[in-house]
Amino acid sequence: MNTKDHANLIEIPMPRVAGFDLAKEMSERPYAVLGLGVLAGYVLGGGLFSRLTGRFLATGLRVVALPLATRAAVTLVQSAWQPPSSGAAEDAMAKGGPRL
């Protein structure tokens, strides 16, 4: 018998929780399952309210939220400064005035 035959002899039943098949996920996405396991261990180990987590969240907020806020502000300013298209004012007045 080689090692592949030995691996098939041991089969551990994996529980299904709310339709989540752990064995299938481990075979299809092993790195995602590993990452979830590390994250769960970090949280259960008390790392959620640590300085390191605070620094990660602050950095993530700067990396993600700042460009989104900048893009939203630019879009808002551009839409406020664009002149109305020809006939748009007449159409708005015919429909009961501009919407604010």
Image: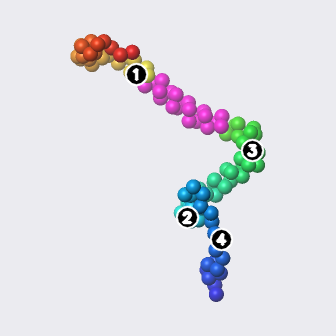
- Circles 2 and 1: CB atoms closer than 8 Å: no
Q: Nearer the viewer, mark 3 or mark 4?
A: 4
Question: Which disc, if any, is residue 12?
Answer: 4
Q: Nearer the viewer, mark 2 or mark 1?
A: 2
Question: Toward the viewer: 99 or 62?
Answer: 99
Mark nearer the N terminus (2 vs 4): 4
- Could you tell me which secondary element the residue under label 2 belongs to? helix
Q: Secondary structure at mark 1?
A: helix
Q: Position of residue 14 (x, y in %)?
A: 63, 66
Q: Quadrant of the N terminus?
A: bottom right
Q: Earlier in the sequence, mark 3 or mark 4?
A: 4
CA distance separating discs 4 and 1: 60 Å
Q: Which residue appears at 40% of the width and 21% of the height?
A: 78
Identify whether 97 is placed above or below 74. above
- The magenta span reads 57-75
Picture quadrant of residue 5: bottom right
Q: Amino acid at mark 1?
A: Gln
Disc 2 and disc 4: Cα gap in Å?
Answer: 13 Å
Badge 4 density bin: few <14, some 14–19, many ≥20, Cα 10 Å: few
Q: Position of residue 27 (x, y in %)?
A: 56, 65
Query: Sequence order check: which comes first, mark 4 or mark 1?
Result: 4
Callout in the foreground (4, 1): 4
C-alpha gap between disc 2 and disc 3: 29 Å
Q: Amino acid at mark 2?
A: Lys
Which quadrant holds residue 57? Answer: top right
The residue tagged 2 is 24
